[in-house]
Amino acid sequence: MEELTNNGAASGASAPEWVQIRASGRRELLDGISAVMSMVDAKIEVEDYGDLDELILDGVYGDLIDESVLNADREHIAVSVYVPTEKSPAEAVSYLRGRFDALGMDVTVETRGVSEEDWVESWKQYYHPIRIGRVVIVPAWEKFDAADGDVIVTMDPGMAFGTGTHETTRLVVGMMDEYMKKGDRVLDLGCGSGILSICASKLGARECFAYDIDPVAVRVTRENIKDNGVCNVDCGVSDLLRDVDRSDKYDLIVANIVADIILRMVGTDGGVPDAQNDVGAILRDGGVLIVSGIIDERAHEVTDAFLSAGWRILSERHENGWCAAALSNR
């Protein structure tokens, strides 16, 4: 996907600074924290000293180990990713906190490297118009000369996830352009900045409903809805499908969230039936579900779960270690 200047030319930028985003929690949460952190970047750094005493007993000489390591907390771990300022660390932090909250995980997310106040403005110099098929995502602070047929979406993501620069977002927008029909009723789960529901509206949806567990994301989505001049997007707070509008079924549902939450949408939670979050119950027969935010290593786990529940895979797309899939319930 190409970044464009306001005259359509590809743009470049100087080498970015990096910010460490560090998530910490109890040691038994290691796998879950690692899975969520890998949503931001597949390369994660793990701090886990739980086996240190055992290693010393097995022959690792304690006097050769730095004292700060010997005194490290054995009960807690930390997982870090490194994000360039051009990708908006603030956006990633908001996304991670929202996902940990959604999973009910007691995790602390902190940053090291650049102050939060600095990121909010500094990353804007790297964010330029991005074309995804007919859709062009344009930063609110830039001007763009649209060509005939361009669908322009103006975005100021603030502290919410969704600028269009991340692979998961681009994959979904591309699939929406392919599978959405004019007049569709659309549901956007984990709306972040509202980018997907705004795209749906501008691609011809009859009405859109956007939900996120994070109230900050809901506020940002409402602001972006207003700035884009769309009047058929309704936005609210919901824990997955708990509080979504069920007055009618949806023709298209998009969910750009983590694999573990997508798996809950099959209609089971840890093997226990979970009718409240069964996405098939609110999708019209023959409708399309687009899921993204899945690392390649977990793609088969997600698609196999839906296949076992009777769904059909329409297509899969991969980009830089991320996977998105379009599925149908008929």
Image (cartoon, helix red, strand yellow):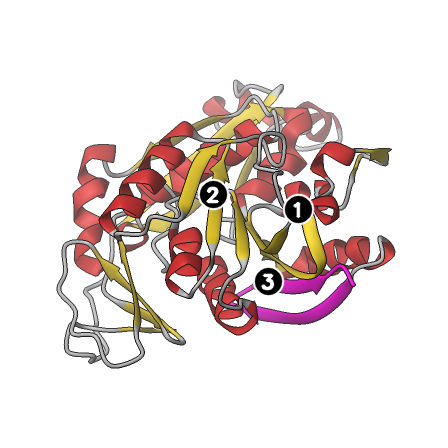
* Residue 88 left/right relative to 315: left
In contact (CB < 8 Å): disc 3 and disc 2: no
**In the drawing, does residue 251 fall left or right of residue 121?**
right
What residue does disc 3 label? 324
Q: Amino acid at mark 3?
A: Ala
User: In this picture, is 327 found above or below 279?
Assistant: below
The image shows residue 70, relative to residue 267, as above or below, that is: above
Kindly identify the amino acid type of the residue bearing the numbered disc 1: Ile
Check disc 1 and report the residue beneath it.
Answer: 262
- Neighbours of disc 2 within 10 Å: few (<14), some (14-19), many (20+): many
Distance from Cα at disc 3 to Cα at disc 2: 19 Å
Are dots 2 and 1 in contact, CB under 8 Å? no
Residue 270, image quadrant: top right
Report if residue 328 lies within the magenta region: yes
Q: Which circle's residue, 2 or 1, is located before the other in the chain?
A: 2
The magenta region covers: 312-330
* Foreground pick, 112 / 197: 197
Q: Where in the figure is residue 298, as x and y percent of width and height?
A: 69, 55
For this rendering, which residue is in front, 289 or 6?
A: 289
Mark nearest the camera among 2 and 1 is 2
For the residues labelled 1 and 3, the Cα–Cα distance comes to: 11 Å
The residue that label 2 is drawn on is 210
Query: Given this view, does label 3 or label 2 mark the residue nearer the observer?
Result: 2
Q: Earlier in the sequence, mark 1 or mark 3?
A: 1
Classified by dominant secondary structure, the portion drawn in magenta counts as strand
Residue at (78% x, 63% y) in the render: 330
Marks 2 and 1, Cα distance to the nearest angstrom?
16 Å
Q: Is residue 48 magenta?
A: no
Q: Position of residue 221 (x, y in %)?
A: 35, 41
Work out whether mark 3 precedes mark 2 in sequence or the reverse, and give the earlier one. Answer: 2
